[in-house]
Image (cartoon, rainbow, N blue to C red):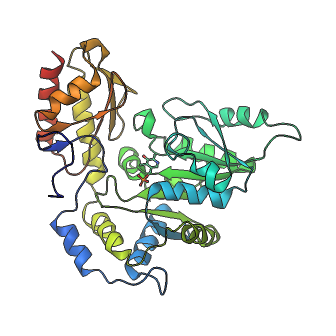
Amino acid sequence: MHHTLSDRSATTIRADFVSDTVTRPDAAMFAAIAAAPLGDEQREGDPTADRLAAVVAAMTGKEAGLFMPSGTLCNLVAVAVHCRPGEALIAERSSHVVTSELGGAAVVAGALSLTLEGERGLFDIAAVDRALDALSGTRAPRARLLCAEQTHNRGGGAVWPVARLSALGAEARARGLATHLDGARLLNAVAATGEPADRHAAEWESVWIDLSKGLGCPAGAVLCGSAAFVAEADVWKRRLGGALRQSGVLAAAALQALETHPDRFAKDNALARRIAEGLAMIPGVALLHAPVESNLIFVDVAATGHTAREIATALAAEGLRIGVEGPTRARIVTHCDLTEGDADALLDALRQACS
Ligand SMILES: *Cc1c(COP(=O)(O)O)cnc(C)c1O
């Protein structure tokens, strides 16, 4: 039955902390999907996907938006629009665009990735300047694009303060770089800072939000920027086979989530804080990337004497799933399908498993 969460062990998973992508549409979301006006995205356009694109463009303070099948495709298309083959993008070395997209920027856009090291994924213009300095001379590739992630996934969901993010974007543009903000979890950052999405994206030319993470939708993302950027992004989307047909089926889910659950990201962040506070009381469990600022928690369990896999297996027997990230590293993610009761059950089971 497709509603059963898919850990391959015999036990049914009743609370899944492995990712915020595991959320399932609820009855209200299915009702919104059933009621949505639909069209053919590749012909006359899909009215619901177009409405969602306009809503997210307004939310991020951009001229235009484009419904996309995934966040990965948003990054790829944005790099292809901003960079010509042989040009370089600059990104923090643990960025999703660098570590988790199978080199798509290189394969498809021909873009070289130059990485710099940040702190929890965050960095300042001085680090960008050092990367640019290394490119002097007639044989150096041209740096064209700066990418940043809000929140930074592998930095433990670290949140850029808006002033710092804006200063970086403005300074990058002053150096002739295009700017792209990977906003897979931008709405978690909006909840964490209390600053609306358009303030986060103000100095960044392109930005996207994911629909399949904290919003709880089955699939999709929305990529935003100037009208000229989005027109070119639409060409790349079609070229790469990313244009769908009745995409309003997916967009309707996102509109329903945006219109009815404005506080869901604050709840997800608060649940992660509750878990982090509980983890601090469990001997041998070390919180990595502290403090927890949004909905991602990374821990190292080496001091318990157990591997992360052993602990994950013990939790699975209790119907709880966490992510194994390395021999002794695990990831715990909060989302809208989890309750405080689930968080407390996780802490209880972890206390048992770690003793
Ligand atoms: C999840 C994620 C992506 C990719 O989004 P998908 O919708 O899963 O393709 C890109 N960047 C970051 C930071 C992410 O966390």
Q: Which residue is drawn at 48% across and 31% down?
A: 120
Q: Is residue 286 above or below residue 73?
A: above
Describe residue 70's horizontal placement relative to residue 7 as left or right.
Answer: right
Q: In this view, does 156 lie above or below 39?
A: above
Q: Which of 211 and 292 is in front in this view?
A: 211
- Residue 4 picture location, percent across and down: 15, 52
Q: Which of 313 and 120 is in front in this view?
A: 313
- Residue 167 picture location, percent across and down: 61, 44
Q: Residue at x 72, y 31 (%)?
A: 130
**Residue 291 falls in which quadrant of the image?**
top left
Q: In this view, does 44 lie above or below 325?
A: below
- Residue 198 picture location, percent across and down: 49, 58
- Residue 329 picture location, percent across and down: 34, 25
Q: Which residue is drawn at 59% across and 58% down?
A: 78
Report the number of numbered marks: 0
Describe residue 227's horizontal placement relative to residue 162 as left or right.
Answer: right
Tell me the quadrant of the picture where the C terminus can be found.
Answer: top left
Outermost residue on the right side: it is 138
Q: Nearer the viewer, residue 5 or 127?
A: 5
**Residue 27 falls in which quadrant of the image?**
bottom left
Outermost residue on the bottom side: it is 44
Describe residue 199's horizontal placement relative to residue 276 as left or right.
Answer: right
Tell me the quadrant of the picture where the N terminus can be found.
Answer: bottom left
Q: Which of 50 and 58 is in front in this view?
A: 50
